[in-house]
Image (cartoon, rainbow, N blue to C red):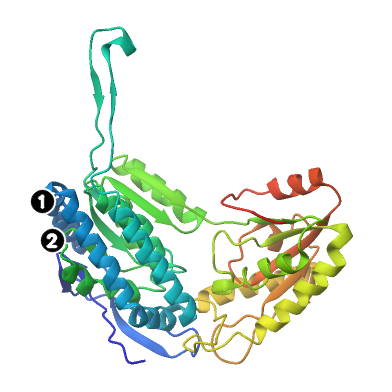
């Protein structure tokens, strides 16, 4: 692929191996080939070292003039842009993201770094005059950084999620420890050289890899003041419990989704089909806010269903090698995710759910699942109620607006929905 693979931890501005020598392996989900078996897994001692480095760096970074913090963050954004091709190749190798989409996500990540860079030094407090309270006292509220913060990224959008978590924290003067997903660590591992080149002092940004146990070490660490997590609801609960049992650290969560798309009879049908086919299938449906429950009014349902079936069949022809510029849709992230999606589909078939198109593996290599449309599954079926996180939508019909809203709200998930007009 023509790009070096960095597999070490990045702590205190240095690439270092795991203290235990534990590693994890990454396989290309498009070809089943081994990418690397040398990704270093952080131990408890490594996490302690990262926390110590971040804690030591905090006074210096917090005391750095806002204009300088801004300049360093802007340079880091520029470096992400200039290295986007290399980083995108690493994402494609690790979790099968099409190279065109990976580059787009990196562009979005750089934009977030620039946005939050502009926030450094602009965090305002609040004041109350004696007249406001009637007690002859001035009251001033000042917002200050927490200190050492941590973030746990999901694998489906590493760089956007890393920017969401790190950039605002750093702009406010905090230091950071980022844990990548065990499915897609190598793109973020690449950051170390860029962190140094941008001018971040040692310890301000630390990057570690590993699976759930490493995340648990961060969530439960008593010297981490805040943790941000993106992933499943079950893992989010575990993060909250560990945070509460340790030091009651601040927690922010972005969890799964089973979002609805509502399509009424006055919708632009072409736009509705596109929104619920090509747009939904971006990243092969592996997006938490993707509208996987498609609710369409009965009067236009036949035309919509015909259109979306055709669009999904055409999408299958654009699914393939994610390293090619013309590929629109890639494989699922790894074999575990592939098996999860196929279990949903096989169970749905066993229940009698109608598969309008797709519903099976594509090819004899990799983790490709054909774009799938399920028609009118029972509202209690797992394929309708649970997050599948793959190229699968369920289409159900409704008669009235009131019924559509009731159906849309009938879920334990939140996040987002889409209205096609």
Where does residue 220 sit, x and y in percent of width and height?
30, 50
Nearest to N terminus: mark 2 or mark 1: 1
Where does residue 332 sit, x and y in percent of width and height?
54, 77
Does 42 appear above or below 333? above
Where does residue 108 sit, x and y in percent of width and height?
42, 66
Q: Which residue is mark 1?
A: 60
Residue at 58% of width from left, 74% of height from top? 284
Q: Which residue is mark 2?
A: 201
Image position of 352 (left or right of 294): right
Dot 2 crowding, Cα within 10 Å, few <14, some 14–19, many 20+: some
Residue at 36% of width from left, 47% of height from top? 242
Q: Nearer the viewer, residue 56 or 234?
A: 56
Residue at 43% of width from left, 64% of height from top? 154
Name the residue furthest right.
299
Does 43 appear above or below 39? above
Residue 291, quarter of the rendered image: bottom right
Residue 39, quarter of the rendered image: bottom left
Image position of 320 (left or right of 253): right
Where does residue 370 sit, x and y in percent of width and height?
66, 81
Image position of 352 (left or right of 193): right
Per the model, the C-alpha gap separating discs 2 and 1 is 8 Å
Q: Nearer the viewer, residue 240 or 299?
A: 299
Image position of 210 (left or right of 51): right
Mark 1 lies on a secondary structure that is: helix
The answer to whether residue 215 shows anywhere in this view is no
Callout 2–callout 1 Cβ contact below 8 Å: yes
């Amino acid at each position: 692929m023509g790009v070096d693979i960095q597999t070490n931890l990045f702590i205190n501005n240095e690439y270092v191996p795991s203290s235990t020598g534990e590693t994890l392996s990454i396989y290309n989900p498009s070809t089943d080939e081994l990418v690397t078996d040398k990704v270093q897994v952080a131990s408890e001692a490594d996490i302690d070292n990262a926390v110590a480095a971040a804690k030591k760096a905090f006074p210096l970074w917090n005391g750095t003039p806002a204009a300088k913090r801004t300049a360093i963050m802007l340079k880091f954004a520029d470096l992400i842009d200039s290295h986007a091709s290399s980083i995108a190749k690493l994402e494609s190798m690790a979790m099968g993201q099409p190279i065109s989409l990976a580059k787009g996500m990196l562009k979005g990540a750089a934009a977030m770094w620039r946005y939050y860079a502009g926030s450094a030094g602009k965090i305002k407090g609040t004041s109350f005059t004696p007249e406001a309270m009637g007690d002859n006292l001035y009251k001033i509220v000042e917002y200050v950084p927490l200190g050492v913060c941590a973030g746990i990224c999901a694998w489906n959008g590493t760089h956007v999620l890393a920017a969401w978590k790190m950039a605002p924290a750093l702009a406010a003067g905090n230091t950071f420890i980022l844990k990548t997903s065990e499915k897609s660590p190598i793109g973020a591992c690449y950051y170390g050289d860029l962190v140094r080149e941008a001018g971040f002092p040692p310890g301000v940004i630390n990057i570690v890899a590993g699976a759930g146990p490493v995340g648990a070490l961060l969530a439960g660490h008593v010297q981490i003041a805040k943790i941000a997590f993106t992933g499943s609801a079950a893992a989010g609960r575990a993060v909250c419990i560990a945070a509460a049992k340790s030091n009651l650290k601040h927690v922010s969560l972005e969890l799964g989704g089973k979002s609805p798309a509502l399509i009424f009879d006055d919708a632009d049908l072409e736009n509705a089909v596109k929104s619920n086919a090509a747009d939904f299938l971006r990243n092969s449906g592996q997006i938490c806010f993707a509208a996987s429950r498609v609710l369409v009014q009965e009067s236009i349902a036949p035309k919509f269903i015909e259109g979306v079936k055709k669009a999904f069949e055409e999408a299958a022809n654009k699914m393939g090698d994610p390293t090619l510029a013309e590929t629109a849709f890639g494989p699922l992230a790894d074999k575990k995710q592939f098996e999860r999606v196929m279990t949903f589909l096989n169970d749905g078939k066993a229940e009698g759910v109608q598969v309008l198109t797709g519903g099976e593996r594509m090819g004899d290599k990799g983790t490709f699942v054909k774009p799938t449309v399920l028609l009118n599954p029972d509202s209690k079926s797992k394929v309708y109620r649970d997050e599948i996180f793959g190229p699968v939508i369920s289409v159900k019909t409704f008669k009235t607006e009131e019924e559509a809203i009731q159906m849309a709200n009938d879920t334990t998930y939140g996040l987002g929905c889409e209205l096609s007009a």
